[in-house]
Image (cartoon, rainbow, N blue to C red):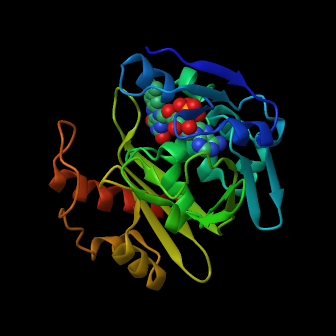
């Protein structure tokens, strides 16, 4: 690991002031530390944001659930507010990694990292989330741009994520047995005006499976999913699953999610 300067900051202004093209924010460190140890990444300045009180916590405001960026997965999993308003989100958090990862990893770190197999990006798309940064609110549909790529500018800090509370929702995933990352994960959220079907793990980036979503908007049933052909074109293929298997998992887990709703 190359030399770096560690900064523990107490407010957003200080974090922003230190941010540069050769810095990284340290939230849970669950991605940053292994990447540095493996020599895959190196930084001049490590800006530890865990001490910024304003970035952590969960609250409900009308039809919106707001989760601070440094809130840990374990906190989301056990939160009464999350369980009451969007129980599927608490279940998603409970299924991330192992207890160590859930007690260090944060929602903001997961979203900023945008691993193509991460769970939270699917929640952001399905639940019409707004990603609130130090200077703007970004619609989730414009935030996740590609593999490990987001709309964040260098040094831009996520402060919170605002989730629209749906009428019904469910997240179902086929986990990698070692890491628990999603081989394929499907988040279905239903509201009076529409249905979202966000898929993670299947392609290079999270996406909304429009064909299943519009079939479900007309007929919210597992049999409606059966009528939609999910094509394997553009799907990931690796040692865990072929593109064709992933396509079939999208249908299977969309049906499971609808049934669980
Ligand atoms: C063994 C293992 C198993 C895992 N299993 C799963 C799984 O099943 N599902 C899943 O979804 N994930 C999984 N993860 C990922 C994990 O849950 C973390 O969410 C993820 O590693 C990043 O979060 P972090 O808080 O640790 O971020 P860090 O590692 O601290 O930071 C990661 C990146 O995000 C940036 N960042 C962090 N916070 C902010 C912020 N507030 N604003 C802007 N940028 C920010 C940092 O600059 C850095 O580039 C796993 C990780 C490990 C190590």
- The part of the image, by quadrant, that contains residue 34 is top left
Residue 108 in sight: no
Left or right relative to 142: residue 202: left
Residue 7 at x, y = what percent?
Answer: 69, 23
Instruction: Name the spot of residue 121 as percent of width and height, x first.
Output: 50, 53
Q: Is residue 249 visible?
A: yes
* Residue at image coords 61%, 64%: 138
Which quadrant is the C terminus positioned in? bottom right
Q: Identify which residue, 84 or 145, lies in the foreground.
A: 145
Tell me if residue 6 comes above or below residue 248 in the rendering: above
* Numbered marks: total: 0
Residue 33 position, x and y percent, is 49, 22
Looking at the image, residue 115 lies above or below residue 153: above
In front of the other: 63 or 23:
23
Figure quadrant of residue 228: bottom left
Residue depicted at x 67% and y 60%:
163
> 148 left or right of 229?
right
Image location (x, y in percent) of residue 58? 78, 46
At 59% from the left and 27% from the top, the residue drawn is: 45
Q: Quadrant of the N terminus?
A: top left
| Residue 238 falls left or right of residue 19 | left
Measuring 83% from the left and 67% from the top, which residue is drawn there? 62
Vertical comparison of 179 with 13: above or below: above
Q: Which quadrant would residue 41 be assigned to in this image?
A: top left
């Amino acid at each position: 690991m190359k030399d770096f300067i560690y900064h523990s900051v107490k407010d957003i202004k200080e974090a922003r002031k230190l941010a540069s093209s050769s810095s990284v924010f340290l939230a849970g460190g669950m991605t940053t530390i292994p990447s540095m140890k493996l020599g895959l990444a190196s930084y001049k300045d490590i800006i530890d944001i865990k001490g910024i009180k304003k970035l952590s916590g969960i609250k409900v405001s009308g039809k919106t659930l707001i989760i601070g960026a440094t809130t840990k997965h374990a906190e989301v999993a056990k939160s009464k507010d999350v369980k009451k308003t969007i129980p599927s989100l608490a279940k998603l958090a409970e299924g991330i990694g192992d207890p160590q990862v859930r007690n260090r990893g944060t929602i903001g770190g997961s979203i900023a990292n945008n691993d193509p197999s991460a769970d939270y990006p699917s929640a952001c798309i399905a639940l019409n989330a707004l990603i609130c940064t130090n200077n703007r609110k970004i619609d989730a549909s414009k935030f996740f741009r590609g593999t490990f790529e987001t709309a964040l500018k260098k040094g831009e800090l996520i402060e919170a994520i605002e989730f629209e509370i749906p009428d019904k929702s469910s997240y179902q995933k086929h986990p990698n047995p070692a890491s628990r990352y999603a081989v394929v994960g499907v988040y279905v959220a239903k509201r009076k005006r529409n249905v979202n079907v966000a898929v993670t793990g299947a392609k290079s980036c999270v996406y909304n499976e429009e064909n299943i979503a519009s079939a479900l908007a007309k007929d919210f049933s597992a049999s409606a999913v059966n009528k939609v052909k999910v094509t394997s074109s553009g799907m990931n293929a690796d040692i865990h699953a072929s593109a064709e298997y992933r396509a079939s998992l999208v249908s299977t887990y969309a049906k499971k999610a609808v049934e669980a709703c």
